[in-house]
Amino acid sequence: MGLIVEGTPMSWKDILPISGHIRYRAALQFLKSYQSQKQRTGDPFLWGDEIEYMLIKLDHTNSRAVLSLNSSDVLKKLHQADDANNPKETDWHPEISKYMVEGIPNIPYGKRGVIDLVSMETNMKLRRKQISELLREDEMVLTIPSFPRLGCDGCTDRISNSTINTQSPCVMDDLISEDNYRFRGVIQGVEERRGDKVNQRIQVYKDKHCSLCESSGEIADRHVTKQQLNNVDIDHVMYGTGCCCLQVTIQTKNLDEAKYLFYPTCDSSVISVFKQLALSASSPLYKGYISDVDTRWPVFVQCVDDRTPEERQLKFGEVGHKGSRSGCVDCYLTSDIYNDKEVTYDEHIYNKLTSEGVDDLMSKHIAYQLIQDPITLHKECLNENNNDDTEIYDIMNSSNWRILRLKLPIPEQNIGWRVEFRPMDVQLTDFENAAYTVFVTLLTRVILEFGLDFTLPLSKVDDNLNRASRRNAVLGDGFYFKTNIEKHNTMNGMMGDMISESCDKEYVQMTIDEIMHGKDEYKGVIYYMNKYIAASKEFDAKTKLTMYRYIKLISDRASGKEKTRARWVRDIVENHPSYKHDSVVSDVINYDLMMKCVNMSDMQ
Ligand code: ADP
Ligand code: MG
Ligand code: MG
Ligand code: MG
Ligand code: MG
Ligand code: MG
């Protein structure tokens, strides 16, 4: 959940009257930082992952697995243990729910050179070991995105002192972590600003006896309301924010490189995110049902939509129209050609930034971002004397939950421009998490090295992202993709003329397999990655071997040789002896699934 801050929380009611003022101040903070840091260059290639862990409690006698709301306690112990470790290899953060913690490497990778690509998995294993050692005997730690029965009655361990086998109603508010005021603030802020409860729907997987589905014109279960028909209804922000993800932050040499990666000319990374999403798909189960989505992303996006009912109805061009605060990105940063998404931005902020010499697209990006109201703040950050820091901007940046995030430099800590990749579902094993982190990290090297240009109109990228979350998307229909991606020799050669050259509007539909392994003239992403590894003088033989093993996993998932975790999970549920083809993930199915997950993550 990003930034961790302390202070006296403000409610949305307190924020509302001063929101415009705060947004403008955030823009001024951005401006100041931008002007002092825009020329910054020569920062080393560093990167780091964030893994979110889920705490589970197992009741073997009754074959039940529930959420353990013990993260605050676990976190305290982790910090104590961490502080005693020398060198300190890991660091731990609270997360939005009482059943999650977030772990990161204490020092970003790359400080010892690219050799760190192999030490990531070791660090991830260390983190898992550190948590596991602190858990109670009946507790487990898993890296799965969505808890299959979150929201079902009796889904947590906080019911009675004696037994967890009590079907007490699940009160979602009780799951919010108290370890940072921002957590409750975000959830309340979204709800209060919306003016109604989150009432979103995830399409249910229509198995033949599914009671939520219309069967031969009749609804099998008469309790199903019209709204719920064919859907699992989602009525709390936590269904989205309470999912675990894998994020990767990469430091770039300078702002140009960050722009290139972030919204490259060609915005290669924006294009690559849908592949990451489809390939990392691990979360098909919600609220005790099998759904028709494979990743947590669309659930998350719906759950944090804080627009009022009126705002949600408005079309572009109508007064008050506003995009959502999460989802894809709104504009490319280095070329306007493919910016075909019509999104309203704050013109006052845009005018201020451009008049101060910020380029047009960067100004637009910030003006798009800051049209969103702050939904959580603390009183202390409003002190008007605080004009040198970027606290307000950072808070707003970290509640804009886009698929990519541009992070400002922190000059006092000698931290440069960074790009964060946020779409991926967390993977069950550390081998997989390391493989996906390497995939993203190396892909940025490959994009920069070969000057690859994947540009597509942003509306097509949106479309790709939607497709990427569907059931079995990885093997499913095509995605918009460009065949001629080798436009430029190197990034340096490209920066000047890239914009005029990338007018090429040719794109076709390709499957993930084709995107990764090639089709006709197009050689495929894996080809470029292997070529990069083979040619690298920095990698020794052992590093190369590890890289190839990671890439093989991704390659096999793209071709279907290896199941995505989402498929793996679906197969376990659908083949369970007690599964009634009713799309329901019962307690016992959930327990057996969690046990399989535990075994799989131990076995790795
Ligand atoms: P947030 O939650 O705001 O995204 P975190 O502190 O949880 O931030 O995670 C930051 C990630 O960035 C960690 O993986 C960390 O190792 C990594 N990181 C820290 N400093 C740098 C840097 N200079 N360059 C690249 N990555 C960094
Ligand atoms: Mg997090
Ligand atoms: Mg992050
Ligand atoms: Mg974090
Ligand atoms: Mg710490
Ligand atoms: Mg909750």
Image (tube, rainbow, N blue to C red):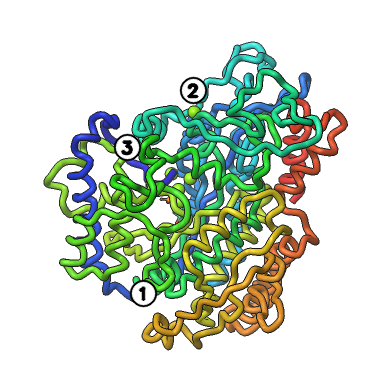
Please name whichever residue, 419 or 354, is drawn nearer the observer in this view of the structure. Answer: 354
Residue at (60% x, 52% y) in the render: 124
Marking on residue 174:
2
Question: SS for tag 2?
Answer: helix
Marking on residue 256:
1
Residue at (32% x, 38% y) in the render: 375
Q: CA separation, marks 1 and 3? A: 31 Å
Mark 1 or 3 closer to N-term? 1
**Quarter containing the N terminus:** top left
- 479 left or right, relative to 592: left
Q: Position of residue 468 (x, y in %)?
A: 62, 55
Q: Choose top left, top right, bottom left or bottom right for residue 518.
A: bottom right
Q: Does the residue labelled 3 lie within 8 Å of ligand 1?
A: no
Q: Is residue 390 above or below residue 510?
A: above
Question: SS for tag 1?
Answer: helix
- The residue that label 3 is drawn on is 376
Q: What residue type is labelled 2?
A: Asp
Q: Which amino acid does label 3 sit on?
A: Thr
Q: Position of residue 213 (x, y in %)?
A: 71, 31
